[in-house]
């Protein structure tokens, strides 16, 4: 190892040499590392670090986005028709929601199985050190201000390629399973129309997610806990504002609570509760046992809204100024 310690450092931030023969100290020239390796002091070292909780939750975050968008477009399709007028059954509606969820779960599990250690739901990963690790393409050095040395590689292996493979499998499973599901479960009923609209929407938003991940994966990785909490706090407030009774009277709070307990609103509230829990766990990473107390904050947005809604109703404000 003496010759390795005395070797000349490689130019650039992410260029390194691969050891061909350690005993004879045979090395490659400075170049990019192979897939599954990352540079460390001008040497390519294998990515064998077990992925951490925060890493797994980042992958689940990308899974959550795809599922929520599927649910959003399914719900949007149902909202365009009158449920009673078309005699829509809750069991059939549940199947329409469940089918995209099953597809995304299958895609996520399959993606885990095809990354090392193969056939396992665990991941071996490169050690993430800084934001620039996600954008090695921006750090290719120029030799003598003329020739550029290409050292672009997946420093954050496998988190960059994992999400891309997942999105591809989401589309693959969707195109494979939905025609079968329509044929067996819905045939030519109105539910198949809702599923078609969701499918066509997915053919737009999945490529968009793929592109966003390609450009902003590093930023998303370091900010997804905050993104989750902020977006779903706003979303929950918007949903509650549309759900509660607009008339302010003695029974307004009771009427609003009754309205919130219908199946659709209750399902949406449970989704928001899940994302509050997810965001808090990702933000705290549960490093210590008392981080569990932060989970008690989950019902606060709903409680605060129900207590303050009466005082912030726009009609009440406009009446005051008149």
Image (cartoon, rainbow, N blue to C red):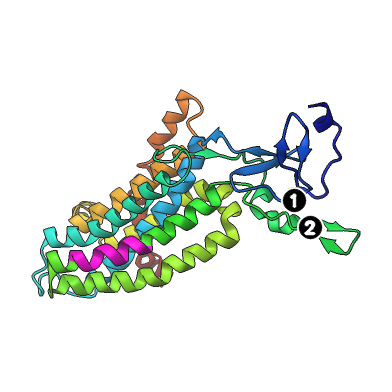
Q: Residue furthest top?
A: 289
The residue closer to the viewer here, 33 or 126, is: 33
- The answer to whether mark 2 and mark 1 are in CB contact below 8 A is yes
Measuring from the top left, give residue 133's x and y in whole percent.
66, 48
Neighbour tally class for label 2: few under 14, some 14-19, many 20 plus, Cα within 10 Å: some
Q: Looking at the image, which residue is at 42% across and 30% down?
A: 293
- Specify whether 140 is left or right of 69: right
Residue 311 is covered by the magenta coloring = no
Q: CA distance from mark 2 to mark 1?
A: 7 Å
Quadrant of residue 127 within the rendered picture: top right
Whether residue 146 is visible: yes
Residue named by callout 2: 149
Judged from the image, the secondary structure of the residue bearing numbered disc 1 is loop
Q: Quadrant of residue 200?
A: bottom left
> Can you tell which quarter of the image residue 75 is in?
bottom left
Magenta segment boundaries in residue numbering: 171-181
Which residue, as the protein is rendered here, is positioned at the far right?
144
Residue 31's disc number? 1
**68 relative to 182, above or below:** above
Q: Residue at x 60, y 40 (%)?
A: 126
């Amino acid at each position: 190892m003496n010759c390795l310690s005395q070797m000349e450092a490689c130019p650039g931030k992410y260029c390194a040499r691969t050891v061909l023969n350690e005993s004879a100290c045979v090395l490659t020239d400075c170049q990019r590392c192979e897939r599954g390796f990352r540079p460390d002091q001008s040497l390519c070292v294998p990515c064998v670090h077990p992925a951490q909780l925060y890493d797994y939750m980042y992958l689940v975050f990308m899974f959550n986005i795809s599922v929520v968008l599927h649910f959003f477009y399914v719900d949007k399709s149902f909202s365009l028709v009158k449920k009673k007028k078309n005699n829509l059954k809750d069991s059939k509606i549940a199947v329409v929601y469940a089918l995209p969820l099953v597809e995304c779960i299958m895609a996520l599990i399959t993606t885990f199985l095809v990354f090392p250690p193969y056939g396992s739901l665990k991941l071996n990963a490169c050690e993430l050190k800084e934001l620039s690790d996600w954008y090695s393409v921006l750090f290719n050095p120029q030799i003598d201000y003329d020739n550029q040395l290409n050292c672009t590689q997946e420093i954050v292996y496998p988190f960059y390629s994992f999400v891309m493979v997942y999105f591809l499998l989401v589309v693959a499973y969707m195109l494979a399973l939905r025609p079968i599901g329509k044929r067996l479960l819905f045939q030519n009923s109105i539910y198949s129309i809702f599923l078609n609209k969701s499918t066509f929407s997915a053919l737009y938003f999945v490529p968009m997610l793929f592109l966003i991940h390609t450009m902003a994966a590093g930023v998303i990785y370091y900010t997804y806990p905050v993104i989750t909490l902020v977006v779903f706090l706003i979303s929950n407030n918007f949903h509650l504002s549309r759900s509660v009774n607009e008339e302010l009277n003695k029974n307004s709070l009771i009427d609003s609570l009754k309205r919130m307990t219908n199946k659709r609103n209750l399902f949406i509230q449970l989704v928001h509760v899940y994302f509050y829990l997810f965001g808090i766990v990702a933000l705290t990473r549960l490093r210590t046992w008392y981080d569990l107390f932060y989970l008690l904050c989950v019902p606060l947005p709903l409680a605060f809204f129900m207590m303050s809604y009466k005082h912030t109703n726009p009609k009440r404000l406009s009446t005051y100024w008149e």
